[in-house]
Image (tube, grey):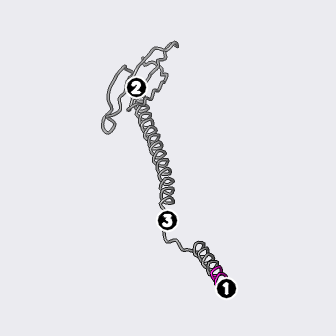
Amino acid sequence: MKNEKCRIQNNELRNFAICNLKFEICNSRRDGFTLLEVLIALAIVGGLLVTLIYTLNYHLGIIEKHETITVATFLAKNKMADLEKEPENKKGIFDAPYEVYTYETFVKESPYEGISEIIVVVRGGKEEVKLNEFVFKQK
């Protein structure tokens, strides 16, 4: 009987210890992150940063291209206005601050009598702008 009483007490003690351990495991406070959580967070942030940098670089390239085309268009229109007064074939470089832009002008006879075609080509970097205009020949 005494042996059985000890066994019951041991079982109760063991059950209490198991319940207490389960409670501790379920309700234990975690003060930090595990290594796996940190690595997953770093992978997500790294992927987002790579995407962001690529997108930013792509859009900055587009902005640079559009700026070059816009400046080249304005320079070509200005050169076209000069050619309307004195049409001539010519090559050259624009004055500062546009010395990276080059131009080439052509004056061609059109199939229509008394009309010439003026062509202005402005190059800046890899971009090229070409404007054509028909004008009456000066007498």
Main SS category, magenta section? helix
Give the mark nearest the N terminus, 2 or 1: 1
Question: Bounds of the magenta span?
Answer: 1-12
Q: CA distance from mark 3 to mark 2?
A: 72 Å
Residue at numbered disc 3: 33
Quarter of the view holding residue 28 = bottom right
Give the mark nearest the N terminus, 3 or 2: 3
Q: Choose mark 2 or mark 1, whichever is in front.
A: 1
Q: Secondary structure at mark 1?
A: helix
The quarter of the picture where the C terminus appears is top left
Residue 58, x across and y down, in percent:
47, 42
Quarter of the view holding residue 137 = top left
Mark 3: which amino acid? Answer: Phe
Pick out the residue farthest to the bottom.
2
Residue at numbered disc 1: 5
Say if the magenta span includes residue 82: no
- Position of 71 relative to 40 (above/below): above
Residue at numbered disc 2: 83
- Position of 47 relative to 10 (above/below): above
